[in-house]
Image: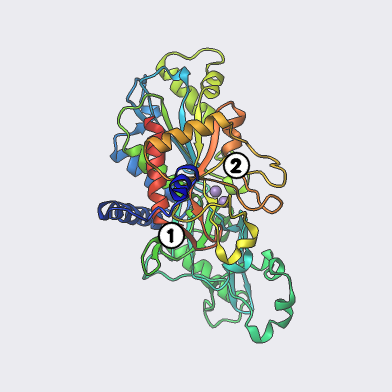
Amino acid sequence: MSEELKNKLFNNKENGWTNLSNETINEINNYSEKYMKFLNSAKTEREFIKQARKLADENGYKDIMEFETLKPGDKIYFINREKSMYLAIIGEEPIENGLHIIGSHIDSPRLDLKPNPLYEDTELAYLKTHYYGGIKKYQWTTIPLSMHGIIVKTNGEKIEINIGEDEKDPIFTITDLLPHLAQEQMEKKLKEGINGEDLNLLVGSMPYNSEKISENVKLNILNILNKKYGITEIDLNSSEIEIVPAFKARSLGFDESMVAAYGQDDKVCAYTSLSAMMKLKNVKNTAVCILSDKEEIGSMGNTGMESHMFDFFISEILNKLGINKPNLLDRVFCFSKMLSSDVDAGFDPIYSSVSDKTNAGYLGKGVTLNKYTGARGKSGASDANAEFVAWVRNVLEKNEIKYQLTELGKVDIGGGGTIAYILANKGADVIDCGIAVLSMHAPYEVTSKYDIYCAYKTYKAFWEE
Ligand code: MN
Ligand code: MN
């Protein structure tokens, strides 16, 4: 009797794996395989865009610049400087009724090479780095690292670098002190244990020849780079080279229920939304997928969400629909709905003290919805309206998708940011909707395959609404 009433009245956040059919479990596993494969070929924003473009082309999407005019059903994309991308399907409804936007980011914490990176010390060659985004520096030492990016010569020639992913490639690493000599280091606060200026990548130890000249090892490295890429040291001035973990995405656990991989913040939401968009046929409201850059460092710059590039893309759509007029862009945004698809802190029982158990996001319990993400008094938060939360809940419940309303950590501890506020400031209804992650921002992040599949279904349902 009370048991029945309890089931009826309580918000039972059940484990999503319970009572799943074998068929559904197979679907989840197959989807995760594709996701992991994609991640392995898309560790940086440029690589992600390359793969995303391939997928879009295969699915009938075309560069918006190829269109003179647009009509409902047209599938388009725009790539911004190889680092961010917007995709859309023109809806049946008049576009002034608003867009259905899903926005994620494809940049992840990492180490960038400095503009003058190469030096030699005591016959060892190193590349200096400047870390990108919020990292715990000690996590980036003594792990295999790979090198990805581009070097652009003054004549415009662009050289692509990808070293350390192929089994036959060498890898790189950052050394750390042996425990025997680390007494002083071990007394330091964790955040001071490794100095940012000491995150130097070990890249060589062999002199060019036996002649007694200075920086013989550095010379050897430059000679190798010159032979392989035709560059000299100064060409590194105009390069963007990212150092990321060389680990592959793998299934995690005896039950293989989780994914361990680098860069799941936020490529897990980017992939799930992108692949959901590829499955869309005709949509009522114009569906827009944002893959943005620079979220991890504040969304600034011309590839970040704060730039006007997104407005430009939507304006181009209005132009090519032949309906643009003053203030129409503002109107379109004001009537738009958006899921800011970004990862959430997963509840970690080993570090339970930082979370409020009643409002934490759990692995395997479906997508997480963050009504707000601000820290200590909701500072800086884009707080979704209750009406919009109810609208999103309705979409999820109609489609039988598990979800959890969550907060990122305890009131006076937590807080984070996403691109939610940027679109909310333009007038759209926005809520954060993503996936709980363990070890967020670490070289190896953990997610649940169940949640990944839920996110895919959520994004598809939102666009099909
Ligand atoms: Mn994120
Ligand atoms: Mn992040």
What's the mark number on residue 152? Answer: none
Q: Which residue is mark 1?
A: 162
Q: How many marks?
A: 2
Q: Amino acid at mark 2?
A: Ser
Indicate which label's residue lies in the foreground, 2 or 1: 2
Relative height, residue 388 to residue 361 (above, below): above
Residue 161: name its quadrant: bottom left
- Residue 78 visible in this rendered orientation of the protein: no
Image position of 224 (left or right of 54)? right
Across and down, in percent, residue 240 comes to: 54, 52
Q: Secondary structure at mark 2?
A: loop
Q: Label 2: few (<14), some or many (≥20) within 10 Å?
A: some
The residue most toward the front is 1
- Residue 301 visible in this rendered orientation of the protein: yes
Q: Amino acid at mark 1?
A: Asn
Across and down, in percent, residue 67 comes to: 36, 24
Residue 138: name its quadrant: bottom right
Q: Which residue is mark 2?
A: 299
Indicate which disc, 2 or 1, sits on the residue closer to the N terminus: 1
The residue shown at (49%, 44%) is 83
The residue shown at (28%, 53%) is 21
Mark 1 sits near ligand 2, with its Cβ under 8 Å away = no
Q: Nearer the viewer, residue 388 or 415?
A: 388
Across and down, in percent, residue 249 comes to: 41, 61
Across and down, in percent, residue 406 comes to: 56, 47
